[in-house]
Image: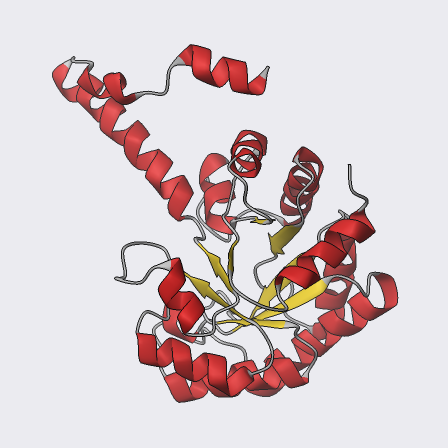
Amino acid sequence: MPTIAERRAAFRKLHESGCFVIPNPWDIGTARYLAHLGFKALATTSAGFAFSRGRADNAVPRDEVIAHVAELVAATDLPVNADFENGFAHEPGEVAQNVRLCAQTGVAGLSIEDSTGNAAAPLYPLDQARARIRAARDALDRNAPDVMLVGRAECFLVGRPDLTETIARLQAYAAAGADCLYAPGLRKRDDIAAVVAAVAPRPVNVLVGGPVGLTVADLTDLGVRRVSVGGALARAAWAGFIGAATELAQHGTFGALGNATPHAELNAFFR
């Protein structure tokens, strides 16, 4: 079993060259199965975990999220990146306190986004957003300097799909100490390439939540360092469940259950 320090070092190494996929489990079982498939690192998903708790995305309290992160860190030998949403606070000082708590779980990385949760003003003003990243960086430097900090610009997810603003925010977060940059919602090759060039040499994470006409090889060619899928794997699992349950409720038939993974196979895997 590698130590936390070894996992964090391995995680940083993954960001130095090439491109890797960092899939998003939402519980211990999915984490262990993804590790079994040979992935080199994992990332939590706020949406996938929230749905498993019967809640909407971004509606799970901080302490439950931290406990979940700790559970996934302990589930495998792989480095784990925490989707730490907006740091569960508005003010930089409180973000710093929460980042310190998250780092204590043993994560190898954590992300802080710039969305406020307020539809009327969905993004923090740039100065405040920058200060929040700086506070997170300072907290890590004091308590867990080997943890990678991911700065997220949520422009495309909150109805402000402005590439110029997105790049300006990502550059500000890099200057404030973010090790990796992430703008979920990018879909076009040119936009992705522009972001990669604008924040170089910092690594860029690209989210792929569905068919976009791009492969991992394509993203590698664009200079992307890592690819995550957010809540997409969880939503794919929900699609199977909803389809089978709906058939049973509406038709009283069991056809979709024929697609289920055999009990013996799963039981043998987890034994």
- Indicate the position of residue 175 as horizontal and vertical percent values: 66, 85
Note whether 223 is above or below 249 in the view shown. below
Q: Position of residue 171 (x, y in %)?
A: 56, 85
Q: Judge by depth and name the residue closer to the eye, 112 or 77.
A: 77
Quarter location, residue 251: top left
Q: State left or right for residue 94 relative to residue 30.
A: right
Looking at the figure, which quarter contains the C terminus?
Answer: top right
Q: How many marks?
A: 0
Observer able to see residue 146: yes
Closer to the camera in the image, 80 or 120: 80
Residue 166 visible in the displayed image:
no
Residue at far top of view: 264
Q: Residue at x 67, y 67 (%)?
A: 149
Residue at image location 68% in from the left, 62% down from the top: 13
- Residue under the image location 45 percent in, 16 percent down: 265
**What colouring style does the render use?**
secondary structure
Q: Residue furthest right?
A: 142
Q: Residue furthest left?
A: 251
Residue 133 lies, in percent from the top left, at 67, 75
Residue 211 drawn above or below residue 178 = above
At horizontal 16% and vertical 13% (from top left) the residue drawn is 253
82 with respect to 143 (left or right):
left
Asked if residue 143 is positioned above or below residue 230 in the image, the reply reads: below
Q: From the top left corner, tell me how far across and down residue 250 is, in percent.
A: 15, 21
